[in-house]
Image: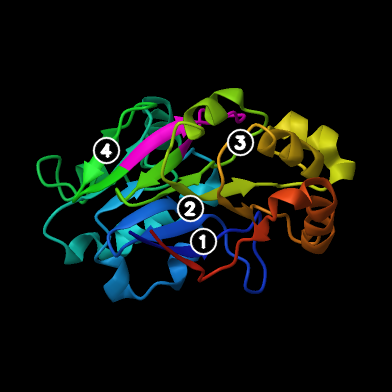
Amino acid sequence: MRLKILGCSGGIGGTLRTTSMLLDHDILIDAGTGVGDLLVSELALIDHVFVTHSHMDHVTSIPFLVDTVGWMRDKPITVHATMQTLDILKRHLFNWKLWPDFTEIPDAEHPVLRYEVITLGETVELGGRKITPLPANHVVPAVGFHLDSGRASLVFTGDTTTNDPLWQEVNQIANLRYLIIETAFCNREKDLAIASKHLCPSMLAEELSKLKLQADIYIMHLKPGEIELTMREIEECAGKWKPHMLQNDQIFEF
């Protein structure tokens, strides 16, 4: 597997892009603003979009992706998400008011977009690549993802706060190599992190203390304007785990 980071920020501005990752050439893990940096020829190769949750910074590029390349393809793009997340997308995004319902275009028998329900803990296998939804604890229904090539695994927590069920699952992954975890706020905004179900550096340290395996750890979803402060606090609170800041265009091969 080859995972390229298209966006990993908690906001936009300059080179900042919101959450989106390209797995090999044909699978998106979330579809934030970073998807827009791909060439049209690259967009046309995307067959699947796995969505952690319905917030705009994770789904904003799905409408533009389908609208741009749906007509260039001989099969629909499949959006994989939980039933709750798909229901939100149907009612509030692809609803003919905010955006056309591409599951009915050009007609219901030959759509350019289709939905596939995923279930917590149930693995989807695509060409030998295993993608398993993991528990997340956020203000809307949400999951993380376990990506397993067979040789090694990468875990992406998605947006989450304190989450014991996640670590119960992660600690069973014998071939874990990489962990990508969010930290959206600095410590002085801990109350906001708790209310919005994100993490701050002190909470991150508490969560990482539950990890019983060795893994290379990367931090994402940092808020613009607080990046340096938050990373400094992460070093102070969680430095023993040697976390790195995730970067656009970073590539993981596993």
Kind of residue sitting beneath label 3: Leu
Which comes before the other along the chain, label 4 or label 2? 2
Left or right, 125 with reference to 201: left
Give the quarter of the figure containing the C terminus.
bottom left
SS at mark 2?
A: loop
Q: Name the residue under label 4.
A: 124
SS at mark 3?
A: loop
Which comes before the other along the chain, label 1 or label 4? 1
| Residue 211 marker | 3
Q: Is residue 140 magenta?
A: yes
Kind of residue sitting beneath label 1: Thr
Q: Mark 1 points at which residue?
A: 33
Pick the front one: 149 or 106: 149
Q: Marks 3 and 2, Cα distance to the nearest angstrom?
A: 32 Å
Which comes before the other along the chain, label 1 or label 2? 1
Q: Is residue 206 magenta?
A: no
